[in-house]
Amino acid sequence: MQDNNFSKEENQKEIDDALHRIKETQVYLDKVRGSLFGGAVGDALGYPVEFLGEEEIFSQYGKDGIREYKLDCAGKKALISDDTQMALFTANGILVADTRVSMRGIGGIPHDYILKSYQDWLRTQEMTFEESRRQPRGYMQGSISWLVDVPELYSRRAPGYTCLSALRQYRNNEIPQNNSKGCGGIMRVAPLALKNYPYMQIEKIDKEGAEIARITHRHSLGYMPAAVLVHIISRIVYPDTGNKKQQNLKEIVIEARDTAADIFAGDGYLNKLTEIINLAVRLSENREDDLDNIHQIGEGWVAEETLGIAIYCSLRYQEDFSAGVAAAVNHGGDSDSTGAVTGNILGALLGYEAIEERWKRDLELADVILEMADDLCHGCQMNESSSYEDPDWIRKYMNMRWRDEHLEAGSKTVFAMVRGDITQDHGVQAIVNAANTNLLGGGGVDGAIHRAAGPELLAECGKLSGCETGKAKITKAYRLPCEYVIHTPGPRWNGGKWNKEHKLLASCYQSCLELVVKNGIRSIAFPSISTGIYCFPLEEAAKIAVSTAKKFTADHPGEIDVIKWVLFDDETFAVYKKELERWEASEPVPSLESDAMNLYF
């Protein structure tokens, strides 16, 4: 008995220690999020003007150039380019390496795993999502990225020829022999600097940054600037504890320049790199026009110019993220890459919370970017013998799956529970309003949706002649960040006699989902219908909600991609999440030999 008690105490201590380590890393989260998200902001802002000349930019967007996202007509999102796509796959590779070191004590050199992850990115550029889903998964099979489960990444966003051709050569067991110094290496390396390596000297981290860029870009000016960028961001996020005086950004830039000079001493192109860094620092301190200064640095099509423009804009606007990324993209060069690298630096410097809300609202894959940033910040806290387990981490970095590790291509709906406000952007085409029968607004969710949508929603609802309890009607969403609102009046709880209320609540979900399919809607978010002032018991409501939706999608395979519940308070979220987990645990799971291999690499 004493041995059992001792074992329980040891297990609990290991769990407590892991949770404490996660809490300790929380201090870095704002900067880590800021850098990865900020890079995506600069990328998305610059992407629409990447191939426009300056005259076209200022003619199309006004004398100040592009200052707001240009939203995609189809999805109403600010699209990321290959820059952010590849940065995410860089992060995925880093975290698989981190996991193998923690769980097996082997491997762990990031660039080896990042190359594998880049092969997964290449798949997204050459296959459809459905084709990719049928490929083998797991470290032993070659694919290591949960990102291949993200449909939006299957989009070609002006990928660089050097990246594509080099990765195809690796796939054919050939080593690339190019002499490219393009910016396709530097634009994707920031995630390395966001992973905390407390026992690794910064010079080694810088070299690893260069190695990551050198995977595809073999000219030294294609990979040396990546080492400088990694140094800058790493020092911002994880300051030098041996330095009593906190370094400012200029001091960090100079240190990065000098460290690169030591690392690459003797390289014939080193002077060109140091000269452009010095020029960027000097120009940032004058009072001349940004565009005139940027013209002196270059256009950003090559890595050293991208670095120079990013250093210039970051130093010039160290307290203003928006002004910095705007300056970085409004020129006739590689606007998305210069915007991305500037966003990486300024986002790290100022933090995610300092980035204006307007940049967060409509960014494509914002949730995926933040999820990856959080994982980079916290790292793998498990080890082979510890009692602490992180099911999400196991799923993503050991089984290489995103949300549902047994999701079949094109046939199974993704179910998710989200803690939040349904009137915010949750990446769905439609949301459900728990309405009154008159459809004219009210309290709770109903009132919040009407307020967010504006008076146009009330005007359209007034033409619908109300709606019966358990039925549903559809309207436009107007000012809400989705396309449609489906209104369904839920039942009031009167004791549940004869199950009348249960049947009506199930009918609410059934009616909504029928409208989803009828209108070609692929994704929808529900609130918790009837559990507010209508007093429907929470646990019973959750069971009805999940079971009705599960049964509907089983009868309509492939017709709905995503069903979410956006739940306003912790108690409701916990109950619905538990019910979804209970239901999915009872579903039959296909037997995949590769899953067992994936779990232990």
Image (tube, rainbow, N blue to C red):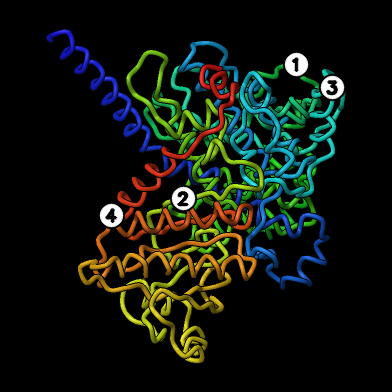
Q: Taking the image as drawn, is residue 254 in sight?
A: no
Tell me the residue that label 4 is attached to. Answer: 539
- Whether 214 is drawn above or below 252: the answer is above
Tell me the residue that label 3 is attached to. Answer: 172
Marks 2 and 1, the one that precedes in the sequence: 1
Q: Circles 4 and 2: CB distance less than 8 Å?
A: no
Tell me the residue that label 1 is attached to. Answer: 266
Q: Nearer the viewer, mark 3 or mark 2?
A: 2
Label 4 – label 2 distance at C-alpha: 17 Å
Instruction: Identify which residue, 339 or 117, lies in the foreground.
Output: 117
Label 3 – label 1 distance at C-alpha: 33 Å
Marks 4 and 2, the one that precedes in the sequence: 2
Q: Quick one: label 4, few (<14), some, or many (20+) residues within 10 Å?
A: some
- Whether 231 is drawn above or below 173: the answer is below
Tell me which amino acid carries mark 1: Gly
Give the residue at x 79% y 48%. Answer: 158
Q: Circles 3 and 4: CB distance less than 8 Å?
A: no
Marks 4 and 1, the one that precedes in the sequence: 1
